[in-house]
Amino acid sequence: MPFSAPNDNKPQRTVVYLSDGTAITAETFGKAIMAQFDMPARQVRVPFVDTLEKADKVIAQINAVHEKDGVRPVVFMTLVNNEIVKRINEACNAMVMDMFSMFINPLEAEFGVKSHHRVGRFSDVSKSDTYRARIDAINYSLMHDDGQTSRDLSQADVILIGVSRSGKTPTSLYLAMQHGLKVANYPLIPEDFERMQLPPALMPYKSKLFGLTIQPERLSEIRNERRPNSRYADLANCRAEVAAAESMMRRAGVRWLSTTTKSIEEIATTILQELELHQADL
Amino acid sequence: MPFSAPNDNKPQRTVVYLSDGTAITAETFGKAIMAQFDMPARQVRVPFVDTLEKADKVIAQINAVHEKDGVRPVVFMTLVNNEIVKRINEACNAMVMDMFSMFINPLEAEFGVKSHHRVGRFSDVSKSDTYRARIDAINYSLMHDDGQTSRDLSQADVILIGVSRSGKTPTSLYLAMQHGLKVANYPLIPEDFERMQLPPALMPYKSKLFGLTIQPERLSEIRNERRPNSRYADLANCRAEVAAAESMMRRAGVRWLSTTTKSIEEIATTILQELELHQADL
Protein backbone atom coordinates (compact mmCIF):
# COMPACT_ATOMS: atom_id res chain seq x y z
CA MET A 1 0.00 0.00 0.00
CA PRO A 2 1.90 3.01 -1.19
CA PHE A 3 0.70 6.01 0.76
CA SER A 4 2.00 9.15 -0.78
CA ALA A 5 3.78 11.37 1.69
CA PRO A 6 2.07 14.59 2.68
CA ASN A 7 3.21 17.51 0.58
CA ASP A 8 3.06 20.86 2.28
CA ASN A 9 3.18 22.89 -0.92
CA LYS A 10 -0.28 22.11 -2.22
CA PRO A 11 -3.63 21.29 -0.71
CA GLN A 12 -3.37 17.66 0.24
CA ARG A 13 -6.43 15.54 -0.23
CA THR A 14 -7.10 12.69 2.20
CA VAL A 15 -8.96 9.62 0.96
CA VAL A 16 -10.46 7.30 3.56
CA TYR A 17 -11.51 3.69 2.97
CA LEU A 18 -14.06 3.00 5.68
CA SER A 19 -15.89 -0.22 6.51
CA ASP A 20 -17.44 -2.34 9.21
CA GLY A 21 -15.37 -5.23 7.86
CA THR A 22 -11.77 -5.35 6.65
CA ALA A 23 -12.29 -2.39 4.28
CA ILE A 24 -10.64 -4.43 1.53
CA THR A 25 -13.62 -3.95 -0.78
CA ALA A 26 -13.75 -0.20 -0.19
CA GLU A 27 -10.01 0.07 -0.70
CA THR A 28 -9.82 -2.08 -3.84
CA PHE A 29 -12.60 -0.11 -5.44
CA GLY A 30 -11.53 3.30 -4.18
CA LYS A 31 -7.96 2.80 -5.37
CA ALA A 32 -9.15 1.81 -8.84
CA ILE A 33 -11.20 5.02 -8.94
CA MET A 34 -8.38 7.19 -7.58
CA ALA A 35 -6.00 5.68 -10.15
CA GLN A 36 -8.08 7.52 -12.75
CA PHE A 37 -6.87 10.83 -11.33
CA ASP A 38 -3.33 12.17 -11.47
CA MET A 39 -3.63 13.63 -8.04
CA PRO A 40 -1.56 13.07 -4.93
CA ALA A 41 -3.69 11.83 -2.07
CA ARG A 42 -3.03 10.55 1.40
CA GLN A 43 -4.86 7.24 1.65
CA VAL A 44 -6.02 5.75 4.93
CA ARG A 45 -7.82 2.48 5.58
CA VAL A 46 -10.18 2.39 8.56
CA PRO A 47 -11.54 -1.13 9.14
CA PHE A 48 -13.97 -2.66 11.66
CA VAL A 49 -16.15 0.43 12.27
CA ASP A 50 -19.13 -1.57 13.46
CA THR A 51 -20.61 0.49 16.31
CA LEU A 52 -21.91 4.05 16.63
CA GLU A 53 -19.19 4.74 19.20
CA LYS A 54 -16.44 3.79 16.75
CA ALA A 55 -18.21 5.80 14.04
CA ASP A 56 -18.28 8.91 16.22
CA LYS A 57 -14.57 8.58 16.90
CA VAL A 58 -13.79 8.27 13.19
CA ILE A 59 -16.09 11.19 12.33
CA ALA A 60 -14.20 13.41 14.77
CA GLN A 61 -10.90 12.35 13.20
CA ILE A 62 -12.15 12.95 9.65
CA ASN A 63 -13.48 16.37 10.59
CA ALA A 64 -10.13 17.26 12.15
CA VAL A 65 -8.41 16.20 8.91
CA HIS A 66 -10.78 18.49 6.99
CA GLU A 67 -9.70 21.41 9.20
CA LYS A 68 -6.04 20.58 8.70
CA ASP A 69 -6.14 19.82 4.95
CA GLY A 70 -8.34 22.79 4.11
CA VAL A 71 -10.27 20.60 1.66
CA ARG A 72 -12.83 17.99 2.53
CA PRO A 73 -11.65 14.37 2.61
CA VAL A 74 -13.19 11.78 0.31
CA VAL A 75 -14.63 8.73 2.06
CA PHE A 76 -15.23 5.47 0.17
CA MET A 77 -17.44 3.48 2.45
CA THR A 78 -18.91 -0.02 2.57
CA LEU A 79 -21.18 -0.17 5.61
CA VAL A 80 -24.26 -2.29 6.00
CA ASN A 81 -25.68 -0.82 9.22
CA ASN A 82 -28.11 1.94 8.24
CA GLU A 83 -27.79 3.74 11.56
CA ILE A 84 -24.03 4.07 11.16
CA VAL A 85 -24.41 5.13 7.52
CA LYS A 86 -26.88 7.80 8.57
CA ARG A 87 -24.64 9.10 11.35
CA ILE A 88 -21.68 9.41 9.00
CA ASN A 89 -23.72 11.11 6.28
CA GLU A 90 -25.04 13.61 8.79
CA ALA A 91 -21.98 14.40 10.85
CA CYS A 92 -19.01 13.92 8.56
CA ASN A 93 -17.55 16.98 6.81
CA ALA A 94 -16.41 14.91 3.86
CA MET A 95 -17.46 13.84 0.42
CA VAL A 96 -18.97 10.49 1.36
CA MET A 97 -19.23 7.84 -1.34
CA ASP A 98 -21.67 5.36 0.13
CA MET A 99 -20.91 2.51 -2.19
CA PHE A 100 -23.37 -0.01 -0.82
CA SER A 101 -26.55 2.09 -0.80
CA MET A 102 -25.92 3.29 -4.32
CA PHE A 103 -26.00 -0.25 -5.65
CA ILE A 104 -28.09 -2.14 -3.13
CA ASN A 105 -31.24 -0.06 -3.43
CA PRO A 106 -31.64 -0.54 -7.20
CA LEU A 107 -30.78 -4.23 -6.82
CA GLU A 108 -33.46 -4.71 -4.14
CA ALA A 109 -35.95 -3.36 -6.66
CA GLU A 110 -34.56 -5.58 -9.43
CA PHE A 111 -34.53 -8.77 -7.37
CA GLY A 112 -37.74 -8.05 -5.50
CA VAL A 113 -36.07 -9.00 -2.21
CA LYS A 114 -34.63 -7.03 0.68
CA SER A 115 -30.92 -7.24 1.38
CA HIS A 116 -30.15 -8.52 4.85
CA HIS A 117 -27.70 -5.81 5.91
CA ARG A 118 -25.40 -8.28 7.54
CA VAL A 119 -21.82 -7.27 8.20
CA GLY A 120 -18.90 -8.79 6.45
CA ARG A 121 -18.65 -11.26 3.65
CA PHE A 122 -15.93 -12.92 5.70
CA SER A 123 -17.68 -13.40 9.01
CA ASP A 124 -17.22 -16.84 10.47
CA VAL A 125 -15.97 -17.96 7.13
CA SER A 126 -13.23 -20.05 8.73
CA LYS A 127 -15.38 -23.16 8.93
CA SER A 128 -16.76 -23.03 5.40
CA ASP A 129 -15.72 -25.65 2.86
CA THR A 130 -14.59 -22.96 0.43
CA TYR A 131 -12.33 -21.47 3.04
CA ARG A 132 -10.81 -24.81 3.99
CA ALA A 133 -10.23 -25.59 0.33
CA ARG A 134 -8.38 -22.30 0.04
CA ILE A 135 -6.10 -23.10 2.97
CA ASP A 136 -5.48 -26.57 1.53
CA ALA A 137 -4.62 -24.97 -1.80
CA ILE A 138 -2.07 -22.65 -0.17
CA ASN A 139 -0.44 -25.58 1.62
CA TYR A 140 -0.41 -27.66 -1.55
CA SER A 141 1.12 -24.87 -3.60
CA LEU A 142 3.80 -24.24 -1.01
CA MET A 143 4.75 -27.91 -0.90
CA HIS A 144 4.84 -28.05 -4.68
CA ASP A 145 6.82 -24.85 -5.18
CA ASP A 146 9.90 -25.00 -7.41
CA GLY A 147 9.59 -28.69 -8.28
CA GLN A 148 10.14 -29.72 -4.66
CA THR A 149 8.15 -32.89 -5.15
CA SER A 150 6.36 -34.71 -7.92
CA ARG A 151 4.09 -36.50 -5.45
CA ASP A 152 0.37 -35.84 -5.75
CA LEU A 153 0.71 -33.94 -9.03
CA SER A 154 -2.53 -35.64 -10.05
CA GLN A 155 -4.24 -33.37 -7.51
CA ALA A 156 -2.92 -30.17 -9.09
CA ASP A 157 -5.36 -27.85 -10.83
CA VAL A 158 -2.52 -26.21 -12.73
CA ILE A 159 1.20 -26.94 -13.14
CA LEU A 160 3.26 -23.89 -14.07
CA ILE A 161 6.56 -24.36 -15.88
CA GLY A 162 9.25 -21.90 -16.94
CA VAL A 163 12.87 -20.90 -16.47
CA SER A 164 14.07 -19.76 -13.06
CA ARG A 165 12.71 -16.26 -12.18
CA SER A 166 9.98 -16.18 -14.78
CA GLY A 167 7.32 -15.53 -12.13
CA LYS A 168 6.11 -19.03 -11.25
CA THR A 169 6.19 -18.79 -7.46
CA PRO A 170 4.24 -15.54 -6.93
CA THR A 171 1.70 -16.63 -9.55
CA SER A 172 1.22 -20.05 -7.91
CA LEU A 173 0.69 -18.51 -4.48
CA TYR A 174 -1.69 -15.88 -5.83
CA LEU A 175 -3.84 -18.48 -7.61
CA ALA A 176 -3.96 -20.56 -4.43
CA MET A 177 -4.67 -17.62 -2.12
CA GLN A 178 -7.26 -15.81 -4.23
CA HIS A 179 -8.81 -18.62 -6.23
CA GLY A 180 -8.33 -21.71 -4.08
CA LEU A 181 -6.45 -23.54 -6.83
CA LYS A 182 -3.82 -26.17 -6.17
CA VAL A 183 -0.89 -24.99 -8.25
CA ALA A 184 2.39 -26.84 -8.59
CA ASN A 185 5.33 -25.18 -10.27
CA TYR A 186 8.35 -26.74 -11.93
CA PRO A 187 11.48 -24.97 -13.08
CA LEU A 188 12.88 -25.77 -16.52
CA ILE A 189 16.59 -26.35 -15.95
CA PRO A 190 19.72 -27.01 -18.04
CA GLU A 191 19.18 -30.81 -17.80
CA ASP A 192 15.78 -30.39 -19.45
CA PHE A 193 17.27 -28.24 -22.20
CA GLU A 194 19.96 -30.82 -22.91
CA ARG A 195 17.40 -33.59 -23.13
CA MET A 196 15.16 -31.16 -25.09
CA GLN A 197 12.23 -32.59 -23.21
CA LEU A 198 9.89 -31.48 -20.46
CA PRO A 199 10.66 -32.97 -17.03
CA PRO A 200 9.50 -36.61 -17.22
CA ALA A 201 7.43 -36.32 -14.01
CA LEU A 202 5.15 -33.85 -15.80
CA MET A 203 4.41 -35.95 -18.87
CA PRO A 204 1.22 -37.57 -17.50
CA TYR A 205 -0.23 -34.12 -16.75
CA LYS A 206 0.19 -32.30 -20.04
CA SER A 207 -3.32 -30.85 -20.01
CA LYS A 208 -2.60 -29.06 -16.73
CA LEU A 209 0.62 -27.44 -17.88
CA PHE A 210 0.92 -23.73 -18.43
CA GLY A 211 4.17 -22.02 -19.35
CA LEU A 212 5.53 -18.67 -18.20
CA THR A 213 8.15 -17.00 -20.33
CA ILE A 214 9.92 -13.65 -20.10
CA GLN A 215 12.08 -11.35 -22.22
CA PRO A 216 15.73 -12.39 -21.85
CA GLU A 217 16.79 -8.77 -21.13
CA ARG A 218 14.35 -8.49 -18.24
CA LEU A 219 15.27 -11.97 -16.98
CA SER A 220 18.94 -11.05 -16.94
CA GLU A 221 18.12 -7.89 -14.94
CA ILE A 222 16.13 -9.85 -12.36
CA ARG A 223 18.76 -12.57 -12.05
CA ASN A 224 21.51 -9.98 -11.72
CA GLU A 225 19.81 -8.63 -8.61
CA ARG A 226 20.08 -12.11 -7.12
CA ARG A 227 23.48 -13.23 -8.35
CA PRO A 228 25.38 -10.33 -9.88
CA ASN A 229 27.75 -11.14 -12.76
CA SER A 230 27.01 -14.85 -12.68
CA ARG A 231 26.66 -17.15 -15.66
CA TYR A 232 23.07 -17.63 -14.38
CA ALA A 233 22.35 -13.92 -14.93
CA ASP A 234 24.39 -13.50 -18.11
CA LEU A 235 22.31 -12.15 -21.00
CA ALA A 236 23.56 -14.71 -23.53
CA ASN A 237 22.69 -17.52 -21.12
CA CYS A 238 19.24 -16.03 -20.42
CA ARG A 239 18.63 -15.81 -24.18
CA ALA A 240 19.60 -19.43 -24.67
CA GLU A 241 17.44 -20.66 -21.76
CA VAL A 242 14.37 -18.70 -22.85
CA ALA A 243 14.74 -19.85 -26.47
CA ALA A 244 15.14 -23.47 -25.37
CA ALA A 245 12.19 -23.28 -22.98
CA GLU A 246 9.92 -21.72 -25.60
CA SER A 247 10.82 -24.22 -28.28
CA MET A 248 10.30 -27.07 -25.84
CA MET A 249 6.85 -25.76 -24.89
CA ARG A 250 5.94 -25.16 -28.52
CA ARG A 251 6.83 -28.73 -29.46
CA ALA A 252 4.94 -30.13 -26.50
CA GLY A 253 1.88 -28.01 -27.31
CA VAL A 254 1.94 -26.23 -23.94
CA ARG A 255 0.19 -22.85 -23.79
CA TRP A 256 2.27 -20.03 -22.41
CA LEU A 257 2.35 -16.30 -21.83
CA SER A 258 5.05 -13.71 -21.34
CA THR A 259 5.22 -12.20 -17.86
CA THR A 260 7.61 -9.39 -18.84
CA THR A 261 5.26 -6.43 -18.39
CA LYS A 262 2.47 -8.13 -16.46
CA SER A 263 1.44 -7.99 -12.83
CA ILE A 264 0.72 -11.15 -10.84
CA GLU A 265 -2.99 -10.34 -11.13
CA GLU A 266 -2.83 -10.08 -14.91
CA ILE A 267 -0.84 -13.29 -15.24
CA ALA A 268 -3.27 -15.15 -12.97
CA THR A 269 -6.35 -13.80 -14.76
CA THR A 270 -4.94 -14.82 -18.13
CA ILE A 271 -4.16 -18.34 -16.90
CA LEU A 272 -7.67 -18.73 -15.49
CA GLN A 273 -9.12 -17.56 -18.76
CA GLU A 274 -6.96 -19.85 -20.86
CA LEU A 275 -7.60 -22.89 -18.75
CA GLU A 276 -11.23 -21.93 -18.20
CA LEU A 277 -10.70 -22.90 -14.61
CA HIS A 278 -13.31 -21.80 -12.14
CA GLN A 279 -14.70 -19.66 -14.88
CA ALA A 280 -18.32 -20.25 -15.58
CA ASP A 281 -18.85 -19.64 -19.27
CA LEU A 282 -21.26 -16.98 -20.31
CA MET B 1 -14.52 -18.53 -6.41
CA PRO B 2 -17.60 -20.48 -5.47
CA PHE B 3 -19.96 -20.38 -8.40
CA SER B 4 -23.35 -21.70 -7.42
CA ALA B 5 -24.54 -24.43 -9.70
CA PRO B 6 -27.44 -23.61 -11.99
CA ASN B 7 -30.74 -24.61 -10.50
CA ASP B 8 -33.45 -25.47 -12.98
CA ASN B 9 -36.31 -25.11 -10.53
CA LYS B 10 -36.24 -21.36 -10.19
CA PRO B 11 -35.30 -18.42 -12.33
CA GLN B 12 -31.54 -18.33 -12.22
CA ARG B 13 -29.89 -14.97 -12.16
CA THR B 14 -26.55 -14.47 -13.86
CA VAL B 15 -24.15 -11.88 -12.49
CA VAL B 16 -21.31 -10.73 -14.72
CA TYR B 17 -18.12 -8.98 -13.57
CA LEU B 18 -16.91 -7.13 -16.62
CA SER B 19 -13.77 -5.06 -17.10
CA ASP B 20 -11.09 -3.93 -19.52
CA GLY B 21 -8.55 -5.08 -16.92
CA THR B 22 -8.48 -8.15 -14.72
CA ALA B 23 -12.04 -7.55 -13.44
CA ILE B 24 -10.75 -8.07 -9.91
CA THR B 25 -12.14 -4.73 -8.77
CA ALA B 26 -15.55 -5.39 -10.32
CA GLU B 27 -15.63 -8.86 -8.81
CA THR B 28 -14.48 -7.87 -5.32
CA PHE B 29 -17.06 -5.14 -5.17
CA GLY B 30 -19.86 -7.06 -6.89
CA LYS B 31 -19.42 -10.06 -4.61
CA ALA B 32 -19.59 -7.87 -1.52
CA ILE B 33 -22.85 -6.43 -2.85
CA MET B 34 -24.28 -9.83 -3.83
CA ALA B 35 -23.39 -11.19 -0.37
CA GLN B 36 -26.09 -8.85 0.93
CA PHE B 37 -28.71 -10.92 -0.86
CA ASP B 38 -29.72 -14.46 -0.02
CA MET B 39 -30.13 -15.30 -3.65
CA PRO B 40 -28.54 -17.97 -5.78
CA ALA B 41 -26.68 -16.48 -8.71
CA ARG B 42 -24.39 -17.79 -11.39
CA GLN B 43 -21.32 -15.56 -11.31
CA VAL B 44 -19.05 -15.04 -14.29
CA ARG B 45 -15.91 -12.96 -14.58
CA VAL B 46 -15.16 -11.45 -17.99
CA PRO B 47 -11.75 -9.71 -18.01
CA PHE B 48 -9.78 -7.81 -20.67
CA VAL B 49 -12.74 -6.40 -22.66
CA ASP B 50 -10.74 -3.54 -24.13
CA THR B 51 -11.99 -3.21 -27.71
CA LEU B 52 -15.40 -2.64 -29.30
CA GLU B 53 -15.08 -6.01 -31.04
CA LYS B 54 -14.64 -7.84 -27.74
CA ALA B 55 -17.49 -5.80 -26.27
CA ASP B 56 -19.82 -6.81 -29.10
CA LYS B 57 -19.00 -10.48 -28.54
CA VAL B 58 -19.71 -10.19 -24.82
CA ILE B 59 -22.93 -8.27 -25.44
CA ALA B 60 -24.17 -11.08 -27.73
CA GLN B 61 -23.33 -13.63 -25.01
CA ILE B 62 -25.06 -11.64 -22.28
CA ASN B 63 -28.16 -11.17 -24.41
CA ALA B 64 -28.25 -14.92 -25.08
CA VAL B 65 -28.03 -15.54 -21.34
CA HIS B 66 -30.98 -13.20 -20.85
CA GLU B 67 -33.04 -15.27 -23.30
CA LYS B 68 -32.05 -18.49 -21.56
CA ASP B 69 -32.44 -17.30 -17.95
CA GLY B 70 -35.71 -15.48 -18.57
CA VAL B 71 -34.50 -12.65 -16.32
CA ARG B 72 -31.99 -10.00 -17.20
CA PRO B 73 -28.42 -10.53 -16.01
CA VAL B 74 -26.76 -8.04 -13.67
CA VAL B 75 -23.47 -6.60 -14.92
CA PHE B 76 -20.98 -5.02 -12.52
CA MET B 77 -18.61 -3.16 -14.76
CA THR B 78 -15.38 -1.20 -14.42
CA LEU B 79 -14.55 0.20 -17.83
CA VAL B 80 -12.67 3.39 -18.56
CA ASN B 81 -13.26 3.67 -22.31
CA ASN B 82 -16.39 5.76 -22.83
CA GLU B 83 -17.10 4.32 -26.27
CA ILE B 84 -17.20 0.78 -24.88
CA VAL B 85 -19.30 1.89 -21.90
CA LYS B 86 -21.77 3.54 -24.30
CA ARG B 87 -21.98 0.47 -26.52
CA ILE B 88 -22.71 -1.79 -23.56
CA ASN B 89 -25.29 0.56 -22.08
CA GLU B 90 -27.07 0.75 -25.43
CA ALA B 91 -26.94 -2.83 -26.64
CA CYS B 92 -26.89 -4.99 -23.53
CA ASN B 93 -30.19 -6.44 -22.27
CA ALA B 94 -28.98 -6.42 -18.72
CA MET B 95 -29.05 -4.37 -15.57
CA VAL B 96 -25.74 -2.60 -16.01
CA MET B 97 -24.03 -1.22 -12.91
CA ASP B 98 -21.45 1.15 -14.35
CA MET B 99 -19.33 1.49 -11.25
CA PHE B 100 -16.76 3.91 -12.60
CA SER B 101 -19.04 6.58 -14.09
CA MET B 102 -21.14 6.67 -10.96
CA PHE B 103 -18.17 7.69 -8.86
CA ILE B 104 -15.81 9.34 -11.31
CA ASN B 105 -18.17 12.08 -12.48
CA PRO B 106 -18.86 13.50 -9.00
CA LEU B 107 -15.15 13.21 -8.17
CA GLU B 108 -14.16 15.16 -11.29
CA ALA B 109 -16.39 17.95 -10.06
CA GLU B 110 -14.98 17.70 -6.53
CA PHE B 111 -11.32 17.67 -7.58
CA GLY B 112 -11.76 20.14 -10.43
CA VAL B 113 -9.73 17.86 -12.71
CA LYS B 114 -10.64 15.43 -15.47
CA SER B 115 -9.91 11.75 -14.99
CA HIS B 116 -7.61 10.31 -17.63
CA HIS B 117 -9.68 7.26 -18.57
CA ARG B 118 -6.64 5.07 -18.76
CA VAL B 119 -7.09 1.32 -18.56
CA GLY B 120 -5.94 -0.75 -15.69
CA ARG B 121 -4.33 0.17 -12.45
CA PHE B 122 -1.93 -2.71 -13.10
CA SER B 123 -0.72 -1.84 -16.57
CA ASP B 124 3.03 -2.01 -16.93
CA VAL B 125 3.24 -2.17 -13.19
CA SER B 126 5.95 -4.82 -13.36
CA LYS B 127 8.78 -2.28 -13.37
CA SER B 128 7.51 -0.08 -10.56
CA ASP B 129 9.34 0.01 -7.25
CA THR B 130 6.17 -0.90 -5.36
CA TYR B 131 5.71 -3.97 -7.50
CA ARG B 132 9.33 -5.07 -7.07
CA ALA B 133 9.07 -4.57 -3.34
CA ARG B 134 6.02 -6.81 -3.36
CA ILE B 135 7.84 -9.59 -5.20
CA ASP B 136 10.78 -9.22 -2.81
CA ALA B 137 8.36 -9.47 0.11
CA ILE B 138 6.88 -12.70 -1.25
CA ASN B 139 10.34 -14.21 -1.68
CA TYR B 140 11.38 -13.08 1.78
CA SER B 141 8.27 -14.49 3.41
CA LEU B 142 8.67 -17.81 1.62
CA MET B 143 12.29 -18.12 2.73
CA HIS B 144 11.32 -17.23 6.29
CA ASP B 145 8.32 -19.53 6.52
CA ASP B 146 8.08 -21.88 9.49
CA GLY B 147 11.30 -20.75 11.14
CA GLN B 148 13.40 -22.01 8.23
CA THR B 149 16.09 -19.46 8.93
CA SER B 150 16.86 -16.75 11.42
CA ARG B 151 19.06 -14.90 8.94
CA ASP B 152 18.00 -11.38 8.00
CA LEU B 153 15.29 -11.22 10.64
CA SER B 154 16.30 -7.59 11.07
CA GLN B 155 14.72 -6.97 7.65
CA ALA B 156 11.34 -8.37 8.67
CA ASP B 157 8.38 -5.99 8.97
CA VAL B 158 6.54 -8.52 11.13
CA ILE B 159 7.45 -11.82 12.76
CA LEU B 160 4.47 -14.08 13.45
CA ILE B 161 4.68 -16.68 16.18
CA GLY B 162 2.30 -19.40 17.29
CA VAL B 163 1.81 -23.14 17.66
CA SER B 164 1.84 -25.34 14.57
CA ARG B 165 -1.35 -24.87 12.47
CA SER B 166 -2.45 -21.61 14.06
CA GLY B 167 -2.55 -19.85 10.69
CA LYS B 168 0.93 -18.32 10.42
CA THR B 169 1.83 -19.38 6.88
CA PRO B 170 -1.29 -18.20 5.00
CA THR B 171 -1.26 -14.94 6.96
CA SER B 172 2.43 -14.32 6.18
CA LEU B 173 1.93 -14.93 2.48
CA TYR B 174 -1.19 -12.77 2.36
CA LEU B 175 0.56 -9.84 4.04
CA ALA B 176 3.46 -10.17 1.60
CA MET B 177 1.28 -10.58 -1.48
CA GLN B 178 -1.29 -7.89 -0.76
CA HIS B 179 0.65 -5.44 1.36
CA GLY B 180 4.26 -5.93 0.31
CA LEU B 181 5.37 -6.70 3.86
CA LYS B 182 8.30 -8.92 4.69
CA VAL B 183 6.84 -11.39 7.15
CA ALA B 184 8.81 -14.11 8.88
CA ASN B 185 6.99 -16.78 10.85
CA TYR B 186 8.26 -18.97 13.64
CA PRO B 187 6.55 -21.97 15.17
CA LEU B 188 6.42 -22.30 18.94
CA ILE B 189 7.47 -25.88 19.63
CA PRO B 190 7.78 -28.23 22.63
CA GLU B 191 11.41 -27.16 23.23
CA ASP B 192 10.22 -23.56 23.67
CA PHE B 193 7.50 -24.66 26.08
CA GLU B 194 9.99 -26.64 28.17
CA ARG B 195 12.31 -23.67 28.35
CA MET B 196 9.24 -21.44 28.91
CA GLN B 197 10.89 -18.87 26.69
CA LEU B 198 10.43 -17.52 23.21
CA PRO B 199 12.91 -18.86 20.63
CA PRO B 200 16.23 -17.09 21.42
CA ALA B 201 16.68 -15.97 17.78
CA LEU B 202 13.61 -13.77 18.15
CA MET B 203 14.65 -11.94 21.30
CA PRO B 204 16.28 -8.96 19.52
CA TYR B 205 13.09 -8.34 17.53
CA LYS B 206 10.43 -8.23 20.21
CA SER B 207 8.75 -5.14 18.81
CA LYS B 208 8.06 -6.95 15.53
CA LEU B 209 6.48 -10.01 17.11
CA PHE B 210 2.82 -10.78 16.74
CA GLY B 211 1.23 -13.95 18.08
CA LEU B 212 -1.51 -16.09 16.58
CA THR B 213 -3.47 -18.34 18.85
CA ILE B 214 -6.44 -20.65 18.29
CA GLN B 215 -9.04 -22.56 20.28
CA PRO B 216 -7.60 -25.96 21.26
CA GLU B 217 -10.74 -27.77 19.99
CA ARG B 218 -10.39 -26.23 16.53
CA LEU B 219 -6.63 -26.81 16.52
CA SER B 220 -7.16 -30.48 17.31
CA GLU B 221 -9.65 -30.74 14.43
CA ILE B 222 -7.22 -29.17 11.97
CA ARG B 223 -4.28 -31.28 13.13
CA ASN B 224 -6.40 -34.44 12.97
CA GLU B 225 -6.94 -33.82 9.26
CA ARG B 226 -3.17 -33.86 8.85
CA ARG B 227 -2.14 -36.59 11.25
CA PRO B 228 -5.19 -38.50 12.50
CA ASN B 229 -5.04 -39.90 16.03
CA SER B 230 -1.54 -38.59 16.67
CA ARG B 231 -0.27 -37.12 19.90
CA TYR B 232 0.24 -33.94 17.82
CA ALA B 233 -3.51 -33.74 17.19
CA ASP B 234 -4.67 -34.97 20.58
CA LEU B 235 -6.99 -32.48 22.30
CA ALA B 236 -5.17 -32.62 25.65
CA ASN B 237 -1.87 -31.90 23.91
CA CYS B 238 -3.41 -29.05 21.89
CA ARG B 239 -4.78 -27.57 25.12
CA ALA B 240 -1.37 -27.75 26.77
CA GLU B 241 0.44 -26.21 23.77
CA VAL B 242 -2.03 -23.35 23.41
CA ALA B 243 -1.95 -22.60 27.15
CA ALA B 244 1.86 -22.65 27.17
CA ALA B 245 2.09 -20.45 24.06
CA GLU B 246 -0.37 -17.91 25.43
CA SER B 247 1.31 -17.68 28.81
CA MET B 248 4.70 -17.30 27.12
CA MET B 249 3.40 -14.48 24.92
CA ARG B 250 1.68 -12.81 27.86
CA ARG B 251 4.89 -12.83 29.92
CA ALA B 252 6.92 -11.51 27.00
CA GLY B 253 4.38 -8.75 26.33
CA VAL B 254 3.67 -9.95 22.77
CA ARG B 255 0.35 -8.90 21.28
CA TRP B 256 -1.74 -11.70 19.87
CA LEU B 257 -5.12 -12.54 18.40
CA SER B 258 -7.19 -15.68 18.07
CA THR B 259 -7.59 -16.96 14.51
CA THR B 260 -10.33 -19.47 15.39
CA THR B 261 -13.23 -17.85 13.54
CA LYS B 262 -11.31 -15.38 11.39
CA SER B 263 -10.47 -15.34 7.71
CA ILE B 264 -6.95 -14.60 6.47
CA GLU B 265 -8.15 -11.13 5.46
CA GLU B 266 -9.49 -10.37 8.92
CA ILE B 267 -6.34 -11.66 10.63
CA ALA B 268 -4.13 -9.60 8.31
CA THR B 269 -6.22 -6.44 8.74
CA THR B 270 -6.11 -6.77 12.51
CA ILE B 271 -2.33 -7.22 12.50
CA LEU B 272 -1.87 -4.17 10.28
CA GLN B 273 -4.07 -2.16 12.59
CA GLU B 274 -2.28 -3.32 15.74
CA LEU B 275 1.16 -2.73 14.39
CA GLU B 276 0.08 0.44 12.59
CA LEU B 277 2.11 -0.79 9.69
CA HIS B 278 1.53 0.88 6.36
CA GLN B 279 -1.41 2.58 7.95
CA ALA B 280 -1.36 6.30 7.72
CA ASP B 281 -3.10 7.62 10.80
CA LEU B 282 -6.14 9.74 10.38
Image (cartoon, coloured by chain):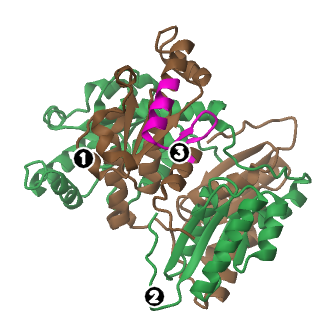
Chain colours: A green, B brown
**Residue A282 point in image, percent of width and height:** 67, 49
What kind of element bears circle 2? loop
Residue indicated by mark 2:
A8
The span shown in magenta is: B243-265
Q: Is residue B10 magenta?
A: no
Q: Residues within 10 Å of mark 2 (few under 14, many from 20)?
A: few
Q: Are dots 1 and 2 in contact, CB under 8 Å?
A: no
Indicate yes or no whether the magenta region holds residue B251: yes
For mark 3, what is the residue? A178
- The chain letter for the residue carrying disc 1 is B
**Residue type, numbered disc 2:** Asp
Q: Residues within 10 Å of mark 1 (few under 14, many from 20)?
A: few
B282 shown above or below A115 = below
Q: Nearer the viewer, residue B125 or A52?
A: A52
Q: Is residue B273 left or right of residue B143?
A: right
Determine whether, in the image, residue B199 is placed left or right of residue B121: left
Residue B45: percent from the left, percent from the top? Answer: 62, 52
Left or right of A25 in this view: B131 = left
Amino acid carrying mark 3 in the image: Gln
Q: What percent of the width, then of the height, locates residue A259?
A: 34, 55
Disc 2 or disc 3, which is closer to the eye? 2
In the foreground, B93 or B160:
B160
Residue depicted at 17% across the width and 47% down the height: A241
Residue appearing at x 80%, y 36% in the figure: B7
Name the quadrant containing residue A147.
top left
Residue holding disc 1: B152
